[in-house]
Image (cartoon, rainbow, N blue to C red):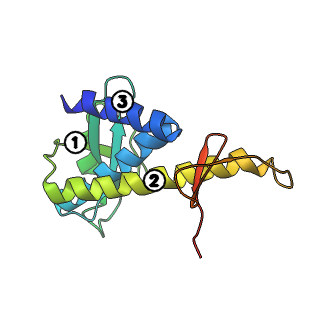
Amino acid sequence: MMSKEILMVADAVSNEKGVSRAVIFEAIEIAIASASQRHFHEDADLFVNIDRETGEIKIQKVLEIVEKIEDPAREITLDTAQKTDKKNTGLKVGDKIYEELPQIDFGRIAAQSAKQVISTRVREAEKNRQYEDFIDKQGQILSGIITVSYTHLRAHETKANLGCR
């Protein structure tokens, strides 16, 4: 059920904010990775991938293959890696392997943190889109409609808040 909800949220936010689905998915992946790191209490590199068609979430721990382990949360020996990943026979020092982690149940705090990360990323993407929309119009006179109060301006598809004095 969660996977379908993620797809619906990505579509809704993308349509509402005029930001690409890829940006929304990237923000959700970063938020899930952050929450997962807190959940597993690890200083490991985590990789989160959301399937864009099904909404399936994969959380993986990234381990670098080394000769001697200095950071057990981020490194693994070649022997251990070969025992762990029997399908991949061409492993060598310097490669990375991905260890599948279980799905987590987000608590209230993790969900709020994820919402904050997603909101920040979406705002950044929205500002970038607005900048790209208007950079070509620099030096031109544009018309706009002032709505409701004198502090809101709508020009084309962009809304802006004007500072009051």
Q: Secondary structure at mark 1?
A: helix
Q: CA distance from mark 3 to mark 1?
A: 25 Å
In the rendered image, the residue lying farthest to the top is 53
Is residue 14 shown left or right of residue 44?
right
- Residue 75's quadrant in the figure? bottom left
Residue 38 visible somewhere in the drawing: yes
Q: Which residue is mark 1?
A: 84
Three-letter amino acid code at disc 1? Answer: Thr
Q: CA distance from mark 3 to mark 2?
A: 19 Å
Query: Label for residue 121?
Result: 2
- Disc on the earlier residue, 1 or 2: 1
Q: Nearer the viewer, residue 158 or 3?
A: 158
Q: Which residue is mark 3?
A: 51
Residue 61 position, x and y percent, is 28, 50
Q: Residue at x 70, y 44 (%)?
A: 133
- Disc on the earlier residue, 3 or 2: 3
Quadrant (top left, top right, bottom left, bottom right) of the N terminus: top left
Q: For mark 2, does the 10 Å Cα neighbourhood hold few (<14), some (14 to 19), or many (20 or more) residues?
A: some
Three-letter amino acid code at disc 3? Answer: Asp
